[in-house]
Amino acid sequence: MRISQSLYSSLLLMPLAIASGQETGTPRDQETGTYPPVPPATPPPETVIQTIINGIGDGFLGTQNFDHPLHRPEEVGLQYENVTFTSEDGVTSAAWFFPKKGSDKLIIANHPRWFNRGGIRGYTEEEARAPGSYWAVNFVPDYEILHKAGYNVLAYEYRNHGDSDSTYAHTLGLLESQDMVAALNYVHSREDTKKMKIGLFSKCVGANSNLHAYRLHPEAFEGVKAQVFAQPLTVRVRLSRVLELTGISLDYMPAVDDSLYNATNFRFEDYELVPSASLVQIPTFVYQVHDDFNTLPSDVQSVYDAMPVEDKSLYWISGTNRRWDAYSWFQEHPEQVVGWFDRLL
Ligand SMILES: *[C@@H]1O[C@H](CO)[C@@H](O)[C@H](O)[C@H]1NC(C)=O
Ligand SMILES: *[C@@H]1O[C@H](CO)[C@@H](O)[C@H](O)[C@H]1NC(C)=O
């Protein structure tokens, strides 16, 4: 089985890309529109392996262009304010604040990597940010649902995404945790929100940043009564899947670690989520596409198992192996997440 040249170029552009079913010729399931898990590819030649591994690091540099929000609250007639806040290390994040009259409950929402507070635009299948997941997602309906359910909402963008500042590298939630802290400090500093009960709705790298923020700045979480994580992701597991699905031996993982370190100044061990998860004392609902071939179910399971809080719940989305399906799941099935916040806030 050969992986096409376009995959190699997309790997260089986007280290999180892997062979999708289409690239390896595996037929798409006609009923569900999804690709089955990809069988191991033939190993590429050594020079290509080196190029891919160097490209993995380059894909984390912070100099890439990110889209501004495509969808806006005006589309659904939601009242909002444009707000900004600045982290301890001087990075300014952009956000929308949706006030809800008479409510003392507030949800802080963030987004997955590649997305912004408005969602993500569509890509071609070959350019998919997470292979198999290339279609557009609009997050504005999420805010509308939460607002209708009685919540103030603060939807913010962490560094290197949307209208927020860019920095030297994307660090998969580590430095982005400072933007989560800045969002919490912002809520605590506003006269009209500072006494509110807070829920956190954090997705992918946003969930990673939520976990690291809790470890690094627990004092910022005052007033946080509940949190929801969509698809937290350990970079070591993610990049091991990139190797597996491109037919590269896992013996190259130390070289991948070096490449990541070269770009971001952090290593796999710094990025591990379990040490942060093992401190969680906030009731937490987690959901994940079980068969997402960009990762392994054991990753989210181990993050979930590590959380010592008794009030926690894990929901697996089934019937798909496409990562993005988790990002429209809430607007299609809001009951569990809204129910989680309603019970705890
Ligand atoms: C290290 O990172 C720099 C950019 O910061 C890049 O130009 C260089 O190719 C990288 N080296 C390796 C071996 O990945
Ligand atoms: C928010 O900012 C955008 C972009 O500058 C602008 O088009 C929009 O009118 C602003 N909305 C409000 C409510 O101020």
Image: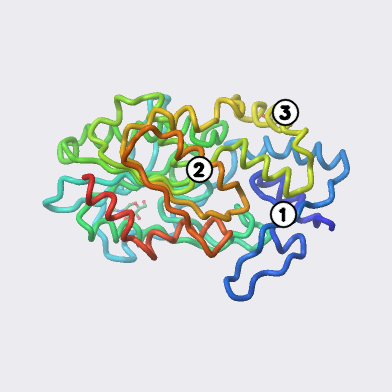
| Residue at the (27%, 65%) spot, across then down | 77
Which circle, 2 or 1, is nearer the viewer? 2
Lower sequence index among marks 2 and 1: 1
Q: Residues within 10 Å of mark 1 (few under 14, many from 20)?
A: many
User: Mark 3 — residue?
Assistant: 254
Give how far apart the Cα atoms at labels 2 and 3 are.
24 Å
Q: Give the amino acid at mark 2.
A: Gln
Where 56 sits versus 217, above or below?
below
Q: Give the amino acid at mark 1.
A: Ala
Taking the image as drawn, is residue 110 in sight? no
| Residue at the (31%, 60%) spot, across then down | 335
Q: Is residue 31 left or right of residue 77?
A: right
User: Mark 2 — residue?
Assistant: 301
Circle 1: element type: loop
Circle 2: element type: helix
Give how far apart the Cα atoms at labels 2 and 1 are.
24 Å
Which image quarter holds the N terminus? Answer: bottom right
User: Mark 1 — residue?
Assistant: 19
Q: Give the amino acid at mark 3.
A: Pro
Q: Is residue 59 left or right of residue 284?
A: right
Q: Residues within 10 Å of mark 3 (few under 14, many from 20)?
A: few
